[in-house]
Image: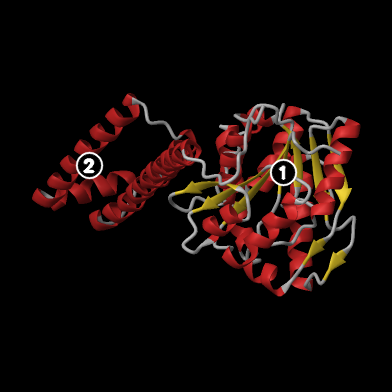
Amino acid sequence: MKMDDVWVVVPMYNEASAIAAVVHDLRTVFPRVVCVDDGSVDQTAVEAGIAGATVLRHSVNLGQGAALQTGFDFVARQPGANWVVTFDADGQHLVSDAERMVGVARSQDLDVVLASRFAGAVDNIPRVRRTVLAAAVAYTRWSSKLAVTDTHNGLRVISTRVLPRLSLKQSRMAHASELLNRIHTLGLAYGEVPTTVVYTPYSLKKTQTNLNSINILFDLALARLRAGS
Amino acid sequence: MIIKLLLLAGILGAVVTALRSSTSMTYLAVRRVALLAFAGAAAVSVLSPSTLTWVANRVGVGRGTDLVLYGLVVVFLFVSIGVYQRIQHLEERIVRLTRTLALNDPDSREADGPEE
């Protein structure tokens, strides 16, 4: 399958030791990879560039949501881009999953394809993490009215035709729920595909702390109040 | 008691301003007038503490100093919300600025983008 019309957006922050391998793996399938360096203080941007990605640099750290949106804005300017894949920089996703999801998006002509670790195989997920994620899923299912099984998976496929309407405002981690809310309010056609998340000691160390879910809830509640007034 | 109504109205007002997050000129004007009134009241309470106590008694508070404390709480709420909103606006601006800078200077080793 030709993947010339697919852009992979990788938000990254201090991932120097992992990013080169991730970009390299991605480029065996997807020729176009754009890494958004969110103000890393290490060699992340350089490593990603050497591995063959286009690199955009945030001069200061803004948060993952802002990095994704910068990537989206970039892809929106690229002629011939039909699909955006979002992919985490820590190597917790499989490139083959992304490839499969693009296939699903193409064949079913969906606007958004989401990955679900709970519908698929889970490698080494710690129990506390599972509980926190389950709570996040329950809350998001209720607030976004989407019957999804995994709400905080960094692997997604999005059609560029809906990109201009998504515009994420949540700079930090609440963007995941924001995106799902947007899918509901815009009435987008979406699908969910079972995928594998590889929990390595590295990705667990890099991933958000469980306490950060409180911050996410707070950001979302504020946004909701604002939108309601 | 009157003071309860006044304080609840103040807190409600603070919440409403927090949600509206407006930066309009009227909002600025209201803030400036409020500042002047606040300064005036502060001057009166310094020059004539008995007036303060009298006002406190009118609204159902025993001592003037207690009235000052209650007022301070409400004012603090308003000020905190104002500062928070300003910071939010600043952050939004920084996001936009940083994004523009990033998009204007993509770094790619290989030929990417439109090859045709």
Residue B37's image quarter?
A: top left
Residue at the image point whose x is 38% and y is 31% from the top? B23
Horizontal relation, residue A38 to residue A83: left or right: left
Circle 1 — which element?
loop
Chain under callout 2: B
Task: Out of B65 and A49, give the one closest to the viewer.
Answer: A49
Residue type, mark 1 in image: Pro
Q: x, y percentage for residue A170?
A: 57, 44
Residue at the image point whose x is 39% and y is 46% from the top? B87
Q: x, y percentage for residue A54?
A: 59, 45
Q: x, y percentage for residue B56?
A: 27, 49
Residue type, mark 2 in image: Phe
Q: Is residue B82 something that shows in the picture?
A: yes
Query: Mark 2 to mark 1: distance in Å?
Result: 64 Å
Residue A167, numbered circle: none
Horizontal relation, residue B7 to residue A99: left or right: left
| A16 versus A110 height, above or below | below
On the image, numbered disc 1 is attached to which residue?
Answer: A31
Residues indicated by labels 2 and 1 sit on the same polypeptide chain: no
Please tell me how crowded label 1 is: few (under 14), some (14-19), or many (20+) other residues with Cα within 10 Å: some
| A183 versus A171 height, above or below | above
Q: Is residue A173 something that shows in the picture?
A: no
Horizontal relation, residue A119 to residue B53: left or right: right
Task: Out of B5 and B36, give the one closest to the viewer.
Answer: B36
Task: Out of B96 and B79, give the one closest to the viewer.
Answer: B96
Residue at the image point whose x is 72% and y is 50% from the top? A27
Chain under callout 1: A
Q: Quadrant of the C terminus of chain A?
A: top right
Residue at the image point whose x is 70% and y is 74% from the top? A201
Please tell me how crowded label 2 is: few (under 14), some (14-19), or many (20+) other residues with Cα within 10 Å: some
Q: x, y percentage for residue B70?
A: 34, 53
On the image, numbered disc 2 is attached to which residue?
Answer: B38
